[in-house]
Image (cartoon, grey):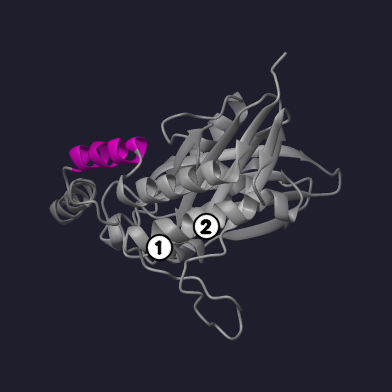
């Protein structure tokens, strides 16, 4: 049985700061590998191949020069998995997370994009407050995942409250349609996160969590993995390609997460990420 542990909020703050800097500067390894792979496989469209190579080069330059991968350094979403044996000391954990984000965006010279009110649109000047999701799990550790997500792709997300009798084909049709509507506007090639089940709000959360899974790792449920592979093909068949220039790669990967739901409904949420899918994690 794990022993109780005390974690200071200052430690949380410093780790969030570090993860914000890392995720904005160093492209996730699985995403970079996928970009290199589709660049190598793009043999029929020289313009698309050149643009894909530019994305690979951009990631290398960002890491070397310690600058942001993309000018839109996003609205930070933080996922915390808190062990039930952990005691937080020194203040409020959400306050500590926001302090970490604020420090990182100041030190990294990242664009500050958050407005305090959705109507009056006054910029906070700190890129906070961020979005925090906290789950309690077993154990005495605390896992923190930071995902800064730009709004060019965030704006293209959609949700549908489908009938419980909806077929897999209907679900896939909605997901493909979502990408088709986005077209080139959200900076493809995309990574698609899909949430199935739960409630309207939880399906949306699932779709975000889906983006955290390595894009070369399919769902452990065979029927869901089959959907992921089917959607990859159908979306690539749209031939939108990188920045709408055509070619073989509209999507780098499709990840689906599921949850139990009510007998009367079938929520389906789609989160689109641009080619710069950014996240970083650490465990205390």
Q: Residue at x 52, y 57 (%)?
A: 99
Q: In the figure, residue 242 lies in which quadrant?
A: bottom left
Label 1 crowd (10 A; few <14 / some 14-19 / many >=20): many
In the image, the segment drawn in magenta is 29-42
Q: Residue at x 43, y 45 (%)?
A: 19
Residue 251 locus on image (x, y percent): 39, 47
Dot 1 corresponds to which residue? Answer: 186
Specify whether 109 is left or right of 255.
Answer: left
Q: In the figure, residue 83 lies in which quadrant?
A: top right
Specify whether 36 is left or right of 19.
Answer: left
Dot 2 corresponds to which residue? Answer: 99
**Which residue is nearer to you in this view: 148 or 179?**
148
Judged from this view, the residue extending furthest toward the front is 90
Q: Which callout, 1 or 2, points to the residue nearer the camera? A: 2
Specify whether 172 is left or right of 165.
Answer: left
Mark pair 1, 2: CA separation: 29 Å
- Against 153, residue 203 (above or below) is above
């Amino acid at each position: 049985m794990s022993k109780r542990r005390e974690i200071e909020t200052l430690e949380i703050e410093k780790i969030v700061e570090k993860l914000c800097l890392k995720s904005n500067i160093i492209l996730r390894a699985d995403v970079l590998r996928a970009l290199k792979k589709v660049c190598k496989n793009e043999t029929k469209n020289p313009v698309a191949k050149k643009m894909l190579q530019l994305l690979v080069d951009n990631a290398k330059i960002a890491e070397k020069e310690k600058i942001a991968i993309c000018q839109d350094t996003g609205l930070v979403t933080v996922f915390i998995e808190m062990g039930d044996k952990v005691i937080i000391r020194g203040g409020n954990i959400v306050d500590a997370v926001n302090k970490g984000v604020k420090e990182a965006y100041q030190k990294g010279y990242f664009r500050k994009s958050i407005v305090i009110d959705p109507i009056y649109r006054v910029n906070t000047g700190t890129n906070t407050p961020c979005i925090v999701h906290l789950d309690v799990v077993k154990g005495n550790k605390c896992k923190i995942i930071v995902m800064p997500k730009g709004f060019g792709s965030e704006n293209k997300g959609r949700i549908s409250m489908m009938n419980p009798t909806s077929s897999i084909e209907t679900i896939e049709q909605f997901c493909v349609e979502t990408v088709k509507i986005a077209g080139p506007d959200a900076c493809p090639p995309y990574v698609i996160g899909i949430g199935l089940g739960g409630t309207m709000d939880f399906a949306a959360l699932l779709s975000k969590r889906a983006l955290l899974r390595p894009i070369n790792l399919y769902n452990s449920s065979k029927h869901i993995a089959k959907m992921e592979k089917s959607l990859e093909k159908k979306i690539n068949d749209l031939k939108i390609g990188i920045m709408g220039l055509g070619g073989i790669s509209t999507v780098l990967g499709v990840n689906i997460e599921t949850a139990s739901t009510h007998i009367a409904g079938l929520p389906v949420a789609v989160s689109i990420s641009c080619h710069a899918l950014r996240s970083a994690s650490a465990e205390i």
